[in-house]
Image: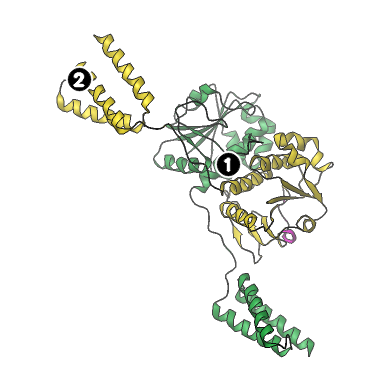
Chain colours: A green, B yellow
Amino acid sequence: MTAIVLVEPTLPENVGAAARALANFGLTDLRLVAPAFEHGADHPRALAAAAHGDAVLRAARTYPTLAAALADRRRVWATTARVPELPLPAVGPRALGAALRAAEAEGAAPAVVFGPERTGLRHADIALADAIATVPTDPACPSLNLGVAVALVAWERAAAAGEPPSTGPLPASREAFEGWFAAFAEAIERAGYLTDPTLRVRALRNLRGAFARAGLTEAELHTLRGVVGALGRRRE
Amino acid sequence: MTAIVLVEPTLPENVGAAARALANFGLTDLRLVAPAFEHGADHPRALAAAAHGDAVLRAARTYPTLAAALADRRRVWATTARVPELPLPAVGPRALGAALRAAEAEGAAPAVVFGPERTGLRHADIALADAIATVPTDPACPSLNLGVAVALVAWERAAAAGEPPSTGPLPASREAFEGWFAAFAEAIERAGYLTDPTLRVRALRNLRGAFARAGLTEAELHTLRGVVGALGRRRE
């Protein structure tokens, strides 16, 4: 399973937010390197921000150095906004999500490392990684909140397994739709809507397009049949 | 351009975090419906959380009702964890990102609506949308932080335009690599490494695989040539 490593985080809220994001997306292994606040993962503001991710936060381990936090890892990505002058491959979040899944599948115990909020990872820490991961952001506002950055990586790893298909109401069969539309056309013809046949044909074609686009269900056709019937009776 | 609408947000920090996420990913149109705190977008804790997204936050408009906030929009997605009993299509974040881009391209002024932190969108608010968007999360910890949820949607919209290609150091030409490896093999043979020819061939094959996997650059080959030369001289 992928480990998320936070190097010298300065705000307990962000550590809590990171724990929550791990829990949201099925990760459990959070590691802290020399946090810059007391009580580490037990800080009350961290616990408050973790919400239902508090179990991940309480299970987080603290290490004195990044090297110690990475000791059991086999593939390591360092996140950074500025790609440094190092001979390392660099990937975006989507490619990272797929690579984390692949590394987990081969048993390679991957880790993604995040730096302190204000400064990001130091050059010496990035040099401990095999590769760099960067989230492309607007140059006018490039810096991501730490909890958001962790959430994006956790989300992309989860999404790499495939997003559930889009769903929606099941449109009626063409037979049911055409049957209803013929009855509708007959009703409005009977009601005297547009006596000019050319105009009426054009209007019906436009109405047909609008109803077709809606992908009406059988139940909706049934309702509309009742509505049109009621309107017709009222007029008579 | 896509508008992000926050209905009755309760924590100024989350509104600030949302503004920052918009700015991170090239969005500018943030709308608040009846925020549950005073000073709206000017709340000091919102401004602190917005960081360099403060311009987006200051430009946010406040509306009394969701209907008012959506008046100029043409396609509207409501975000919700539980897909409600409504005849609306439902999409995941990736499909939503692509749909927002498509809606922007057709000039359809899209909006994505987010509910209050604790309760999510009310049924009556969801009913104002054309479609539902849901982020698939772990059932054990399904609820996303509001700022994170906004960031995921903004990120997916940005990423739908395509992620920059992965990059890395350019491997040397095969000719340069083979030339170097032949010299390396000769040097270690001269040094008397493994006198048994069968074992030496096998060891060289394994070393060759390791060096090939690294995708060594021309500069790295040059360095390695120097290293091997120095080691050879030292031994002699």
- The chain under label 1 reads A
Asked if residue B144 shows in the view, the reply is no
Q: Mark 2: which amino acid?
A: Glu
The numbered dot on residue B189 is 2
Within-10-Å neighbours for mark 1: few <14, some 14–19, many 20+? many
**Magenta residue check for B119:** yes
Q: Amino acid at mark 1?
A: Leu
Q: Nearer the viewer, residue A118 or B173?
A: B173
SS state under label 1: helix
Q: Nearer the viewer, mark 1 or mark 2?
A: 2
**What number is the disc on residue A220?**
none
Decide if residue A186 is in sight here: yes
Q: Is residue A47 depicted above or below A193 in this figure?
A: above
In-image side of B39 versus A44 (left or right)? right
Task: Residue B137 in the image: state x and y as whole percent.
Answer: 58, 49
Q: Nearer the viewer, residue B157 or A168?
A: B157
Residue B190: % across, % down: 20, 17
Q: Which residues are magenta?
A: B118-125
Give the CA distance from mark 1 to mark 2.
51 Å
For label 1, the residue is: A152
Label 2 crowd (10 A; few <14 / some 14-19 / many >=20):
some
**Predominant secondary structure, magenta span:** loop
Q: Quadrant of residue B173?
A: top left
> Do the dots labelled 1 and 2 sit on one chain?
no
Q: Position of residue B211 (x, y in %)?
A: 32, 29
Q: Residue at x 52, y 46 (%)?
A: A158
